[in-house]
């Protein structure tokens, strides 16, 4: 089984969120997950749902603030194994090229 999720953790602040987001990302290091941070969140990949939920809960708890908003979108493949990079590769194959990363 594989579980892929999009995680976005954001404290409510008028200052830069980067220091607190870094704490959330750092919390993922304590778990057996793969992750890739992008401008809109962090893609997290785990072998099972329990590991994914524990890791993302730790990321949420790591952020300081009076109010923290967390968005978690989960894609759990139950019938077959699929990794996050394979999803991107499938789109690239359909496009006939790599998806653009630069402006």
Image (tube, helix red, strand yellow):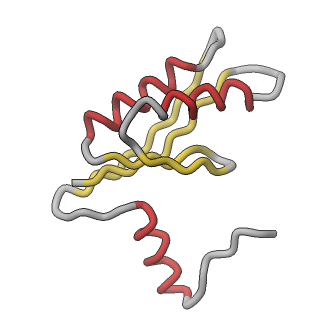
Residue 11: horizontal and vertical position, in percent?
66, 22
Note whether 67 is above or below 34 in the view shown.
above
Residue 55: horizontal and vertical position, in percent?
40, 31
Note whether 7 is above or below 36 in the view shown.
above
Residue pictured at 49% horizontal, 47% vertical: 35
- Residue at the top extreme of this rendering: 66
Residue pictured at 26% horizontal, 34% vertical: 50
Where's the N terminus, which quadrant?
bottom left
Where's the C terminus, which quadrant?
bottom right
Instruction: Count up the numbered dots.
Output: 0
- Can you tell which quarter of the image residue 31 is in? top left
- Can you tell which quarter of the image residue 25 is in? top right
- Residue at the left extreme of this rendering: 79
Note whether 97 is above or below 57 in the view shown.
below
Residue 9: horizontal and vertical position, in percent?
58, 31
Residue 72: horizontal and vertical position, in percent?
45, 38
Residue pictured at 50% horizontal, 18% vertical: 61
Q: Is residue 42 left or right of residue 11?
A: left
- Can you tell which quarter of the image residue 10 is in? top right
Q: Is residue 10 left or right of residue 36?
A: right
- Residue at the bottom extreme of this rendering: 96
């Amino acid at each position: 089984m594989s579980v892929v999720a999009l995680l976005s953790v954001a404290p409510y602040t008028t200052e830069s969120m980067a220091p607190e987001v870094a704490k959330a990302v750092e919390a993922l290091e304590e778990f057996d997950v793969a992750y890739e941070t992008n401008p809109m969140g962090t893609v997290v990949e785990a072998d099972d749902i329990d590991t994914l939920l524990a890791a993302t809960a730790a990321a949420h708890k790591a952020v300081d603030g009076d109010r923290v908003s967390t968005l978690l979108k989960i894609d759990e493949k139950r019938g077959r194994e699929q990794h996050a990079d394979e999803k991107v590769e499938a789109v690239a194959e359909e496009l006939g090229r790599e998806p653009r990363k630069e402006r």
